[in-house]
Amino acid sequence: MSTQITTINHFTQLNAWQKNHELVIAIYKTTRKFPDDEKFGLVSQIRRSASSITANIAEGFGRKYKKDRNRFFQIANGSNTETQNHLILSKDLEYLSKKEYEELKILVWEGYKLINGLIASTNRNLSK
């Protein structure tokens, strides 16, 4: 059985970017129905934290040095965690239904795990 190694040439090929991009799109669509008075509050915060995830994955991918790459992946991880917090708040304020929250929670958690995989992989390569 042969093992095929796939070369990733663009950040959009990273599973972590793809899953978190799916999250960003879902958050933008879901927050459209939040109250108008949250437009510059929670809506803005959750959209910025979510879009920061994919932006930092992309920036990390584009970095030449592994230490730099890892730093941006760590920032993406922090943005994902911040997004988790905003989702909990949105649920508790009843801006999200239980179903919407559960669907977004799955996406954000899957994205978090994939970012951790990028970090672990980069850390392994740093020690080589």
Image: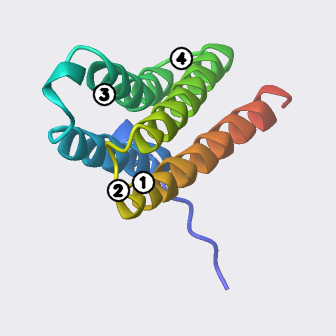
Q: Name the residue under label 3.
A: 47
Q: Residue 71 carries which label?
A: none
Q: Name the residue under label 1.
A: 101
Q: Is there a contact, CB below 8 Å, between mark 3 and mark 2? A: no
Q: Is there a contact, CB below 8 Å, between mark 3 and mark 4? A: no
* For discs 4 and 2, the disc positioned in front in the rendered view: 2
Q: Which residue is drawn at 46% across and 31% down?
A: 86
Q: Is there a contact, CB below 8 Å, between mark 1 and mark 2? A: yes
* For discs 3 and 2, the disc positioned in front in the rendered view: 2
Residue at disc 1, secondary structure: helix
Query: Above or below — where is 81 with respect to 27?
Result: above
Q: Mark 2 points at which residue?
A: 97
Q: Position of residue 36 (x, y in %)?
A: 13, 26
* For discs 4 and 1, the disc positioned in front in the rendered view: 1
Pick the front one: 46 or 6: 46
Pick the front one: 7 or 121: 121
- Rendering quarter of residue 87: top left
Q: Mark 4 points at which residue?
A: 64
Total number of numbered labels?
A: 4
Query: Above or below — where is 44 with respect to 127?
Result: above
Among the two numbered marks 3 and 4 on one chain, the one whose residue lies closer to the N terminus: 3
